[in-house]
Image (spheres, helix red, strand yellow):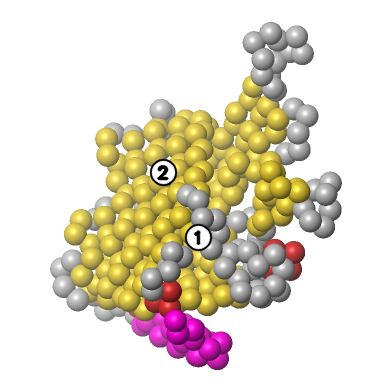
Amino acid sequence: MYNPKPNMMKKIAASLHFLIITFVCCAQSDTMPKPKWTHALQTGINLNQASFSDNWKGGGVSSYAMGAFLNYLAKFQGTKWDNNSDLQLQLGYLQNKGEVQRKNADRIFYDYKAGYRLAAKWNVFASLNFMSQFKEGFDYKTKSVVDLKQDSLISNFLAPAYLTSSLGLEYKPVVYLWMRFGLGTLRQTIINDTRISNAKLYGLEKAGDKLRNQVVFQYIISFDKEIVKNVTLKWRYTVNFDYYKVGKPNAFVHILNANLTLKATKYISTNVSVNLIRDNDQDKALQLSQVLSLGVLYSFEK
């Protein structure tokens, strides 16, 4: 199997970044006399608590959980150009009596896309996407090889982080559904924590490496709609195919993020989020996270 040299990967990375930045800069100048901007903001706090007396015969452990989230979406629609900016932040903690505090949600997601209209439902696009987490993450089933008194560190801020630059075609049959075909996509894995990079996690070939470049084909389908009154469903499915791993089990990476929001009142909501990841460079088994929360929600649209 052909393996690209590091210098070639750097040249490909630089070329893709240059093309995408040029495309995005061109998208800022639109001839439409009255451009249309749409802004949507959602932010909230979720709290959960349970307590049991020491002699509670039904069993159980006192606990509390709290989390916060912020979602911001900005869209620009011009005569030929359109721009989308999507920011999603989430952080939550769980505390069980007698145990150390643990994360139960941690997500940084930002996606920017500039598209130029070719036909009624087709665009050529350039996009930049960033994904990471805020705080340290641990494998609580495995002790650290450095210090057996500590759990094994498996993630941190910018470790990993994924920076994806993509050029391709976009299909938008309806306002709440779109698909992207990223024919030229550079996926970069950043490991800015020596403790994690030395363990050669997330597909790193050598201990101590902090950057991994992959040239992939990327397909994304996204759905965002109020399916019934006060019930909004938003999901995004991404597939990355590594051109240089044809025929290998780790050639594909599948990511599904889904969120269902039910607004009980103007400021009270229930939120269900599900995340699925199939990435053999991370784990050969399917990864699943699911969070159900009730809390205060503030939303704004303009």
**Boundaries of the magenta span:** 1-26
Label the magenta part by its dominant secondary structure.
helix
| Between 85 and 127, the one nearer to me in the picture | 127
**Residue at image x 67%, y 15%?**
59
Q: Residue 280: which disc?
A: 1
Numbered label attached to residue 259: 2
In the image, residue 76 above or below residue 6: above
Between disc 2 and disc 1, the foreground one is 1
Mark 1, secondary structure of its residue: loop
- Residue 240, by quadrant, is bottom left
Task: Confirm whether residue 127 shows in the render.
Answer: no
Q: Residue 155 in the image: state x and y as whole percent.
A: 65, 57
The answer, for residue 26, to whether it is visible in the render is yes
Give the mark, 2 or 1, whose residue is nearer the N terminus: 2
Between 107 and 5, the residue placed more toward the observer is 5
The x and y percentages for residue 202 are: 58, 64
Q: Type of residue at label 2? A: Asn
How far apart are the alpha carbons under marks 2 and 1? 24 Å
Q: Is residue 130 magenta?
A: no
Q: Quarter-wise, where is residue 108 in the image?
A: bottom right
